[in-house]
């Protein structure tokens, strides 16, 4: 897109529609800083191209405004993950399963974003909430259930120790997602991020704070490798 | 808890109901990022299990909404500490007494949270407000009164020097709580936190910024040791 | 280990010898802050237990001092990765191959650590040096060669853009390793780390600065998943 | 201006009306922290002095309030750049052309501010949106079109790799503008800023986060040098 | 002490000899930045006052230089803790026992400083090394042995998760000591410090990085409360 | 003040009413985090003690609410400095004069707070706005006028270079006040603060960001020294 | 380059020899972290390709070791800039002239690196040392001499105000180079960097701390635009 | 000074010899990063101009090398302050007296630098060492002696609380100097700096970490105001 000054600017987005072919991923739309009109325009372009739609970080009011401008049933809104998405199909169990864990119930939004992003790519996924290390028995009791997953995504705020403890117990890939839950030194998720990067457990990898979608795409890369 | 994608997620919390048995503490509910409905659901589960309830960081409007959905008298709301809590019983004087001090009146909310959390565990506690080091005589005049406490909790924002001066004057355990009061370099409480950790007074310990509940639980561990 | 005060302390390490069984990984020894005597003692314990040995971050002088106290041929020293290691066996090509890339020649030590750690676990691995994004043609010319690797490890200092560009081009798992090369804002590797975490490419994961060993173990988890 | 205490203070601004003569630039008014009344007063003083007006960082509501207090047509409001500005004249093609690029559509506001500020000084300028490095083909396809510009301004948030890749491909001056788009470690634009400063591409220069106006003035200095 | 300019300055230290009476603690001398002559002068003043001597952070060469200038047997040097100290007496078991734990063997120096500082005050103390959370079984196997200690001091570098896991398992006071061991984001101990402050375990308290002496004095305050 | 748990807490402030006698300063009330009721209560206590009142950081709505609960004329509100204050008396010229300077018009609130706080102590004071270093002639033209002031207070945001340039030109005490005006790296005033502390001009002193009151009290200490 | 594990690694650098054609710049070799042997190998490869050689950040001892392994006269060493370089040819005055300024004499090494890098590309360049803003007259006296330069490079440590003052006085492109000279908050050059980015002077651009070479390449891009 | 590329650079400093006339201060030479030859050259230029010489941050070996190249008695070296200086004259008591205080004996070097810099300007000065707030009685006992000083300079590392407590007790100007003594969060002096800026005591001003010379010049400005 190019524009001559002065006058109104054409601010239409250029979508990376070859991403599915190149990387096997749908291009998620980051909805946080976009207006209703911008989201509607991008969604319609994606629907016209027969792409799966995933719009992240959309609050309920904006989601309803977007849905009211689209054909009924074109998209759904999932409140836990704050995402708009195309109708999901049954996951394909042959690719393998992902387990998403959280330290506390305040980590749910991030975990749900990862869970939904995997669902949009046909990946089977389970959620294990509230297995934080301050009550270690809750994690130890679920270890056997976790062994059937090919990839583990562990979301935690505060000190973020859950993925470290987990990666010391099981041999699968563990993707750590710091969550911006907390106050004081843990506000914004930096303490959790640093703890995950500094982990004494071998082979833990980390994504950006609150990046549930990114963790899901990393799991997708692994499942298809 | 586990869930299959897609569809609505079951976001119910899993409470650590063995905490009282294991650690002798009630599990406080951090109310800041939870909705009224989430708090009501958790409180009812705790009441059903006959647990003492303490919900921290609840503003007045949310507190009233929660109370309106519970049986009358089930919980009280204390505005200074912004906490919902079960009716308190008389403290047990045999365990020993805690004194909570503040540098200025802006530190009250944090001090009151510590004070109430101790009350929920039956610990006797006094508050000493406005004894900051810029008017040193206010602290020196209260030293004798402080000697009868087994543990001291000192809350301060700005440069956070109160616990340092205090720990140089008395031999008891002193728990320092930085408070997120201030502006410029003291905004968010980091200057106070660092000053407390860097203290030249021997044997001072520190908790996270604004963590009145944590300081109370540390005092509880000491009183029962 | 326990000791009564006063007197000399028994500072022997307790090795996690069940790690191979639990996680399928050898326990690497971090040699940087350990004395020659400490390393020799740990190595001998590992050799006695018939474990594969990998000691990271050992400079040449310390390596020679260690080797002089061990039986000839028990360990080798690789100068590029600064590692002491057991004799390597031929890699097993059936597990899949890993490619390790670097932005510049100053990233070699970190890449070589990853490369050797994979060799210690029998994984086939290739190195692609000097494919940084300031001369983009060097990376684009190697894309076809990279497609046969199951996992990519991309090491970069300065602004750390290599893994971002790479993960936008290929669908495999990409593990980003920030390198502490640079000066000013890039000194210590934090700029590269933050750039990798903030990446606009989907599904990139990151390990700690200079953590070549950790990236290798993450690749190992993926290959075996 | 000087004032005696006590009493109401005269808070009128002292404009640097010799700036055009000294530096060849109009003095942009930073509208973010100014009230409608303050902006109107300054604008009127500039109009009286026959100066070109450019007021940056004005939201739509404040812009409309300002416009309603000025003669019709005295200023225009451009919503993409959030700027109030004097009517623009046709650019003078003999000075040379500037190209402004963005990594993603969320960088539009900053790019549009640069674009408009150049227009206010009679400089021809094109916009190239959505050429971020996660879909590298979009940038490579536009390289030929960029070669006719004398100066390139590259705006990017997240990891901010666009100007690095660009400056490795073309010989012109490249001015990098970090954008405060992102979350976690990229929130506020610091990760992009550091990546641009740490760039492995030679001769890249950087301005403050979101400083589209500053980048435009740097380009103006270059075009006139 | 006061001095008139100009001329040589009298730089003699003023010892706080009333500290034992006021706080029940010996005044440790921080030896890191002091010369041999300064340490000898201070030690002799303390010996003349019949005070117990504890000089921390003294490397072996400086320690030997100090010892050579003192009467034989006046002080001992413990290499693990890098401390010079008065001969120790048998601990008094009636005050209660402290257990000092470390995550890894690189944390030994800090743990040994705490252990020795307690010994200088007649407190019985045990050391439990290498119980880090990446091999969780090592900690779980020692839980019963830890129950007899009145206070626990947990030293850890890297992500610093050990005290968090510990404080979720046992009801005693837990004092967390971050250790400046690690590299990248854990270099200097800040990641461990922040993780300990942000801990999801209730009632954990924290001291400055590497402050083994401070943790010991905090334990002493608790034991005597 | 002391209180027994449970029950409503007495959160009344303890004013440092001996401050005037000890330090010769009125105790300013920091109004930002206090409710209307809290401010009214404190003001009434001060009025009863015949103290001069100065309440800082009060927005217009809160100020009007406070004034409506006080006797007419008891306090005034100055909108530029956002302060409530007792009626001012004529300054006493014999103590000497202070000049308050600002780099730009966005620094006015901080400068006005300093100006008013001096007025509350009877100090004569002038304001010099918009003398920032990007248009150096504005400062150079005012140098002669500044020579009659005994103390200079220089308020600046952005890069904060004004006090450095000023202190290189004149011999009087210069107190630098960083202002939290700016965006990107200057947001919050930290860049200005660091520039003022790092100044190459000899004998510049600095106060906290936005601390106009503090700068005034420092000037007061100097004038009375 | 690719290598099979295990065995010695081929760590030869891959030079970007097309850089001169693509960007018109020689590829400077960053000598700081490279051994004598590595530098000699790279230099010989460059000499074989008839490239101009510039090796930055080489201390005198390493420089002499390198020179002793090369043919006499192949390279020169300039001690002020700590650079090894090919013999220089006379600058071409038609391209325009650059002026490099420094705030203090401690900024010389960075300024000399910029000066030499321009000389390696045939650009005429002058140095103006010690024109820092604490003695403003030194800069004002040189303004006329600066007007003949097409580009200005201003190097400064401490608070870094020199380029801000300069860019407010002259209309040419000003490239600011923060210098890692100072102590306390200015140690490492971050205060200078932030001050330059936050500058109130319009159109200033900035490069990384100590990046004299980068500033020279930015000037080169401008001169050829 | 100007130089043509290529060839050896003239790196002679340009001294600000009008500083004494303009500001009434000698220009101190910062010796830390200068070679012996550079210091000798600058000192000789100052001696030729009959200026008082003060060279700060010179270790003993460098000082002796400098002195050996100067006429006997031209300069003295004071080891506590690490300064070379001209012979001092008797202070002039009529200007007023300064008291320099330190929290601990590790702050001596900074306090001695301030003390000597005042001596070089003929100001009477006393030192009060080891009056840190962990043993508060030491400060309280000296309050009366401090009342005769017109200005107080308080140097402290660790948490830096000394100037805060002092400024709450006495009405004179208090200049706070953070000292880079400590470890963990207090390493480098940043915790002390932030605590001093965040101080709850009114009218405290602060200089850069370790800047004893700057504090002395600030005191000099006050004494002459």
Image: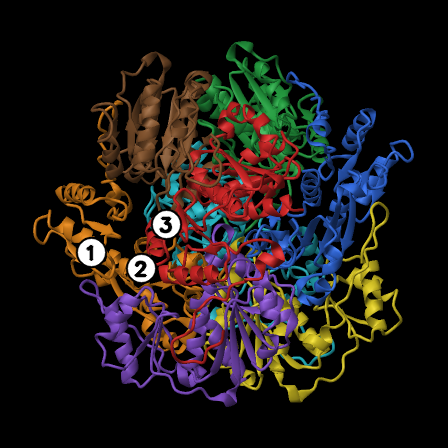
Chain colours: A red, B brown, C blue, D purple, E green, F orange, G yellow, H cyan
Q: How many marks?
A: 3
Left or right relative to D177: residue C209:
right
Residue G146 visible in the shown view: yes
Residues D18 and H88: in front is D18
Query: Which residue: 33% across, 41% down?
Result: B134
Q: Residues within 10 Å of mark 3 (few under 14, many from 20)?
A: some
Judge depth for marks 1 and 3 and give the one in front.
3
Task: Where is residue H46? Give x, y as percent.
Answer: 59, 68
Provide the residue designation for mark 3: A59
Pointers 1 and 3 within a single chain: no
Q: Earlier in the sequence, mark 1 or mark 2?
A: 1
Comparing labels 1 and 2, the label whose residue is closer to the camera:
1
Question: What's the residue at 52%, 77% (across, down)?
Answer: D99
- Relative depth, front residue between H24 and F119: F119
Q: Secondary structure at mark 1?
A: helix
Quarter where residue F147 is shown: bottom left
Q: Which residue is mark 2?
A: F110
In this orientation, which residue lies closer to the viewer: B1 or H43?
B1
Seen in the picture, residue H171 relative to H15 is either above or below; the reply is above
Q: Nearer the viewer, mark 3 or mark 2?
A: 3
Gap between marks 3 and 2 measured at Cα: 37 Å
Secondary structure under the numbered disc 3 in the rendered image? loop
Give how far apart the Cα atoms at labels 1 and 2 are: 16 Å
Please report, as a chain letter, where disc 2 is located.
Answer: F
Measured Cα–Cα span from mark 1 to mark 3: 32 Å
Q: Position of residue G113 (x, y in %)?
A: 68, 70
Residue named by callout 1: F60
Residue at far top of view: E94
Q: Secondary structure at mark 2?
A: helix
Q: Position of residue A194 (x, y in %)?
A: 55, 43
Q: Badges 3 and 2: C-beta atoms under 8 Å apart? A: no
Taking C42 as reference, is H152 above or below it?
below
């Amino acid at each position: 897109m190019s524009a001559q000054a002065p006058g109104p600017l054409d601010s239409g987005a250029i979508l990376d529609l070859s991403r599915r072919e190149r990387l096997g991923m749908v291009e998620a739309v980051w909805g946080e800083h976009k207006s209703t009109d911008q989201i509607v325009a991008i969604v319609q372009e994606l629907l016209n191209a027969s792409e799966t739609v995933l719009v992240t970080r959309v609050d309920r009011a904006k989601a309803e405004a977007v849905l009211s401008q689209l054909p009924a049933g074109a998209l759904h809104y999932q409140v836990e993950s704050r995402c708009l998405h195309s109708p999901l199909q049954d996951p394909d169990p042959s690719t393998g399963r992902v387990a998403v864990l959280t330290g506390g119930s305040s980590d749910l939004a991030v975990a749900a974003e990862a869970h939904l992003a995997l669902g949009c790519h046909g990946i089977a996924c389970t959620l294990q909430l509230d297995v934080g290390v301050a009550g270690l028995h809750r994690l130890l009791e679920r270890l056997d259930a976790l062994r059937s997953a090919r990839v583990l995504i562990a979301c935690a705020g505060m000190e973020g120790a859950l993925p470290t403890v987990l990666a010391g117990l099981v041999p699968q890939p563990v993707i750590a997602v710091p969550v911006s839950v907390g106050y004081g030194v843990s506000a914004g998720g930096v303490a959790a991020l640093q703890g995950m990067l500094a982990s004494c457990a071998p082979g833990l990898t980390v994504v950006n704070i609150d990046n549930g979608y990114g963790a899901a795409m990393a799991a997708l890369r692994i499942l298809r490798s």
